[in-house]
Image (tube, grey):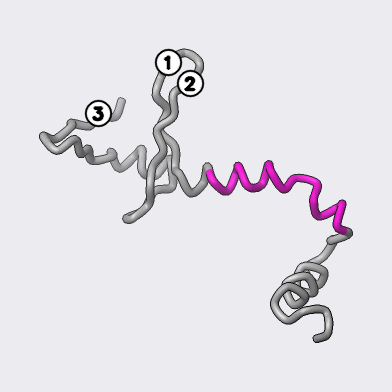
């Protein structure tokens, strides 16, 4: 079990094992979520945002006909420079 003490300012030090498991490094943000059981779950906010974005974009590449890194680069170039590049 990992235990952390809350300071007078409401700060805690996340135990090293928890930081490792969450992939946290200095400057990262952590997210506190309440699950359906009322328990508070701690998550790496960056990783959570990436997972949410991946879920939101699931299937979009197939819809747009993107199947390779070259297709992605062509799309980036089109957005950056317009179609008349």
Can you identify the residue that label 2 sits on?
Answer: 35
Q: Are marks 2 and 1 in contact (CB under 8 Å)?
A: yes
Q: Quadrant of residue 66?
A: bottom right
Give the label, 3 or 2, closer to the camera: 2
First reached walking from the N terminus: tag 3 or tag 2 = 3
Q: Residue at x 57, y 48 (%)?
A: 50
Residue 13 is inside the magenta segment: no
Q: Are marks 3 and 1 in contact (CB under 8 Å)?
A: no
Q: How many marks?
A: 3
> Residue 58: x, y in percent?
75, 45
Q: Is residue 12 left or right of residue 48?
A: left
Can you identify the residue that label 3 sits on?
Answer: 3
**The C terminus sits in image quarter:** bottom right
Judging from the image, what secondary structure is the residue with disc 2 in? loop
Q: Is residue 75 left or right of residue 35?
A: right
Q: Are marks 3 and 2 in contact (CB under 8 Å)?
A: no
Pointer 3: residues within 10 angstroms few (<14), some, or many (20+)? few
Q: Residue at x 39, y 24 (%)?
A: 40
Can you identify the residue that label 1 sits on?
Answer: 38
> Residue 21: x, y in percent?
43, 40
Position of residue 83 relative to residue 52, above or below, is below
Magenta stretch: give its range: 49-64
């Amino acid at each position: 079990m990992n235990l952390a003490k809350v300071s007078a300012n409401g700060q805690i030090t996340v135990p090293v094992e928890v930081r490792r498991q969450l992939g946290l490094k200095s400057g990262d943000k952590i997210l506190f979520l309440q699950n359906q059981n009322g328990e508070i779950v701690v998550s790496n906010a960056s990783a959570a945002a990436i997972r949410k974005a991946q879920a939101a974009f699931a299937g979009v590449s197939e819809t747009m006909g993107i199947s390779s890194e070259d297709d992605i680069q062509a799309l980036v170039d089109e957005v950056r420079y317009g179609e008349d590049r």
